[in-house]
Amino acid sequence: MTKEIRSVEFVVLPTSRTKARQMFQIAGACRFVWNHFREKNLGDYQNFKNGKGTQPPVSFFSLGVEFSKLRHETDWLRKLPAHPVRYTLKHFADALKQAMQGKKGFPKPRSRRQTIPSFTLPSEENFGIKKLNEKYSLLRIPLVGWVKLTRRGGNPYEDNVPKQVVLRHDGRRWRAFVFYEVEVEEKLDDGKVLGVDMNVRQIATSDGHFYFLPDLRRKEARRKKYQRRMARQVKSSNRRKDTKKKLAKVSRKIVNIRKNWVHQTTKEVADRYGIVVVENLNVKVMTASAKGTVENPGKNVRQKARLNKGVLDTAFGEIRKKLEYKCGRLIEVNPAYTSQTCSECGHADEENRKTQARFQCVSCGFASNADTNAAMNIRRLGMARLHGEGSGISTAPANREIDARLPNGQQSI
Ligand SMILES: [Zn+2]
């Protein structure tokens, strides 16, 4: 048994307007503190960038000391709970550190309009959770008091220890992400290896399974319609607000359908196989957006490619992330040539790919669904990696570095 952190998402039902307002107040204070420290540190940052002076202290601890002073001097801030508001500086310290190291730009200001209202209850002392009945749990938030939580399917980890809670407003209501420490059985590396070929609307596996994303075209068309309508409408008009609401609703639905699909699919895969081989995302996304996606095959427009890259990044990133924690072991391989190489004889040829969907080897005659064939190649590359042999496909260098960083950690698809 090992311990892992798992999160469960609940809908928050604040039982009064006051409680809802207080939650926004805490989130607003976090934004204020972020912006305050941003301005305070901008000068130091610029000096340091220009080679003047040594790097100023940027740890959560040193910022925390400053925060205590600020809080002491600011009446309205003192009325709000210290820990959740101070925790903003944890994120800020990380962002600042990266900026000082030149990895990222200086942290951007958080605006009332653009920033998603959110705050964190960083440790067990800051909150309480208890079960109310089959349908509801209760969460205690400092200042706000108890609010109701609900989740379809109940709470799978209700017997575990909650470590942290993140509250976020999704434009319509508050959601609580509760992080539990969970005892998990170590997934046995049972030697069964599965290759997975990822596409935006479907996943193909080397054992011939397909997992299709539910058809979202009508919903996506509706989303586009509302987007266009909104662009035409007069700013801050009631009609525009109405459209905005509808747009938010359909977008949320699309997000949830994708999310559920990723959850179910990765669970099914992980239940059957201990070792899963996927394509290296960075390379996959690059080639996929250059080619156009499944939806827009061949439309090689640069803007489109950039747009697709974002979509693909999150879609694949989410699948990969879920597989990583559900499977015993995840192996990444370079996807180059996996779509044109014959999984039977290893012959690589553009001619092998008869159509988008069909694969037929011009050398040995092996025919299969193109994505299944790709998944089988991915599996073989993974096996080669496992056994430390050559690549298995002569033309494709398989020994790329594994990039452990995930694109868009928080974002769901
Ligand atoms: Zn062949």
Image: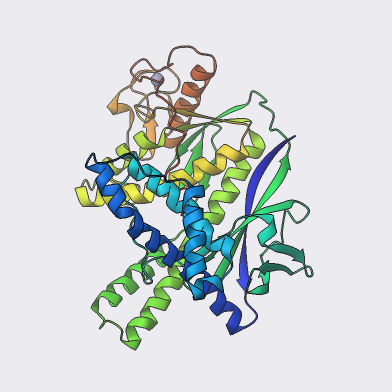
Q: Residue furthest top?
A: 389
Residue at 43% x, 71% y is 248
Inspect this view and state whether residue 410 appears. no
Residue drawn where x is 62% and y is 43% of the image:
268
Locate residue 364, reporting x and y percent: 39, 18
Spot occupied by residue 126 in the image (x, y as percentages of width and height):
66, 61
Q: Quadrant of residue 234?
A: bottom left
User: Could you say which is closer to the camera, residue 333 or residue 358?
Assistant: 333
Q: Position of residue 65 (x, y in %)?
A: 50, 54
Q: Is residue 399 visible?
A: yes
Camera-side residue of 179 and 271: 179
401 or 383, nearer to the observer: 401
Against 167, is 393 above or below? above
Please state, as top left, top right, bottom left or bottom right, where the N terminus lies in the image: top right
- Please provide percent x and percent y for residue 235: 27, 81
The residue shown at (54%, 14%) is: 387
Q: Quadrant of residue 187?
A: top right
Classify the position of ligand 1 by quadrant: top left, top right, bottom left or bottom right.
top left
365 in relation to 119, above or below: above
Residue farthest along the bottom direction in this orientation: 238
Relative to 55, does residue 88 appear above or below in the rendering?
below
Q: Quadrant of residue 39?
A: bottom left
Q: How is the image coloured?
A: rainbow
